[in-house]
C-alpha cells in the first residue's frame, strides 16, 4: 500500500490513480482457467450418464434442464462451455460415436443401429454418419473389419 501511495503522489493526475486501481484489481481476479457458473462435477456426470443411457430416445432441452434443476439457457451455456458445442450438436456427436461403436463391435443390422441412435430412418442415419465420418455405415463396418 505504501508503494501505491508513493506512485500516486509522484504522479498527481487522475490517470495514475486509474492505472494503479486497474492493476491492483486485475491482480485479484481469477485466472482465465478458473470459470464460474458451470456445472458441478456431479451434475455433468449425471447429464452425461443420462444422455448416454437415453441415446435411442428423443431428448429435449427441457427434459435435460429439469434433470439438473437449471434453466434452459443455463444448460445451453454450460454445455457449450464444457463441450465446446451446442447441446444438440453434443447429443448428435454422442449418437454418432455410439453408432460407430456398434458398427465396429457388433453384427447388428444398420437399421437397428439407426434406431438405437434415434434416427428416424436408416437413410437419415446414413447421411448423418457419412457427414461425420466420410464413410457410409456399411463402408465403415467393412473398413473396420479389414483392420481386425
Image (spheres, grey):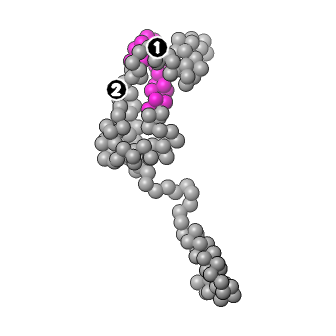
Identify whether 8 is placed above or below 94.
below
Q: Is residue 105 magenta?
A: yes
- Nearer to the camera, 61 or 103: 61
Q: Nearer the viewer, mark 2 or mark 1?
A: 1
Q: Is residue 62 magenta?
A: no
Magenta range: 91-115
Q: From where the camera sits, is residue 13 visible?
A: yes
- Nearer to the camera, 21 or 1: 21
Would residue 66 appear left or right of 85 to someone viewing this image?
left
Q: Secondary structure at mark 1?
A: helix
Residue 27 location in percent, x, y?
58, 69
Q: CA distance from mark 2 to mark 1?
A: 18 Å
Q: From where the camera sits, is residue 106 visible?
A: no
Q: Residue furthest right?
A: 10
Q: Quadrant of residue 134?
A: top right
Residue 57 location in percent, x, y?
34, 26
Q: Tell me which residue sits at (31%, 37%) in the image.
A: 63
Magenta stretch prevailing secondary structure: helix
Quarter containing the C terminus? top right
Quarter containing the N terminus? bottom right
Q: Tell me which residue sits at (46%, 29%) in the image.
A: 92
- Asked if the residues shown at circle 2 and circle 1 are in contact, with their CB atoms under 8 angstroms apart, the answer is no
Q: Quadrant of residue 28?
A: bottom right
Look at mark 1 in the image and give the residue it sits on.
123
Would residue 96 appear left or right of 50 to someone viewing this image?
right
Look at mark 2 in the image and give the residue it sits on.
57
Residue 74 location in percent, x, y?
39, 48
Amino acid at each position: 500500500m505504501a508503494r501505491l501511495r508513493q506512485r500516486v503522489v509522484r504522479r498527481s493526475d487522475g490517470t495514475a490513480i486509474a492505472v494503479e486501481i486497474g492493476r491492483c484489481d486485475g491482480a485479484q481476479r481469477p485466472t482465465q482457467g478458473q470459470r464460474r457458473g458451470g456445472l458441478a462435477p456431479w451434475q455433468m456426470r449425471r447429464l452425461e450418464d443420462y444422455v448416454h443411457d437415453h441415446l435411442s430416445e428423443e431428448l429435449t432441452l427441457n427434459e435435460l434442464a429439469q434433470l439438473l434443476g437449471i434453466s434452459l439457457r443455463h444448460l445451453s451455456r454450460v454445455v457449450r462451455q464444457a463441450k465446446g458445442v451446442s447441446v444438440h450438436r453434443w447429443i448428435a456427436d454422442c449418437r454418432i460415436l455410439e453408432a460407430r461403436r456398434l458398427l465396429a463391435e457388433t453384427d447388428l443390422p444398420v437399421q437397428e443401429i439407426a434406431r438405437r441412435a434415434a434416427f428416424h430412418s436408416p437413410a437419415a442415419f446414413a447421411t448423418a454418419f457419412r457427414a461425420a465420418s466420410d464413410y457410409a455405415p456399411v463402408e465403415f463396418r467393412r473398413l473396420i473389419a479389414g483392420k481386425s
